[in-house]
Image (tube, rainbow, N blue to C red):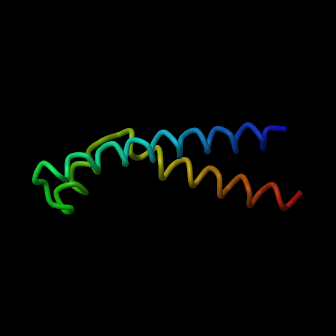
Amino acid sequence: MWFIFLMLLGFGMTTAGGVSLIIYLNIIPVGVSFYQYLIFVKDRPECYLFILGIVIIVLTVYFARER
């Protein structure tokens, strides 16, 4: 049962982080280069939710198959 909770938690974090990354893409037309965009995103804590969510999903799928 807790595998479902972890999977949904990871999905929610991945969605929140991915939406933040897409929203921050709007600063590129202002004249910011892609390298400057990556530097900006690196400093935003909500963008780390994307990576953390993917890690949680992968670990949940991996450990759920062992049972």
The C terminus is located in which quarter? bottom right
Q: Residue furthest right?
A: 67
The image quadrant that residue 63 belongs to is: bottom right
Q: Residue furthest front?
A: 29
Residue drawn 37% across and 48% down?
22
Residue drawn 17% across and 52% down?
29
Residue drawn 46% across and 43% down?
49
> At which x and y percent is residue 6?
70, 41
Which of 21/43 is in front?
21
Residue drawn 20% across and 47% down?
27
> At which x and y percent is residue 43?
26, 45
> At which x and y percent is residue 8?
68, 39
The N terminus is located in which quarter? top right
Q: How many marks?
A: 0
Task: Describe residue 10's horizontal placement relative to residue 52 as left or right.
Answer: right
Which of 52/25 is in front?
25
> At which x and y percent is residue 11?
61, 44
Task: Describe residue 7's horizontal placement relative to residue 30 as left or right.
Answer: right
Which of 39/15 is in front?
15
Which of 26/39 is in front?
26
Task: Describe residue 42's horizontal placement relative to residue 13 as left or right.
Answer: left
The image quadrant that residue 13 belongs to is: top right
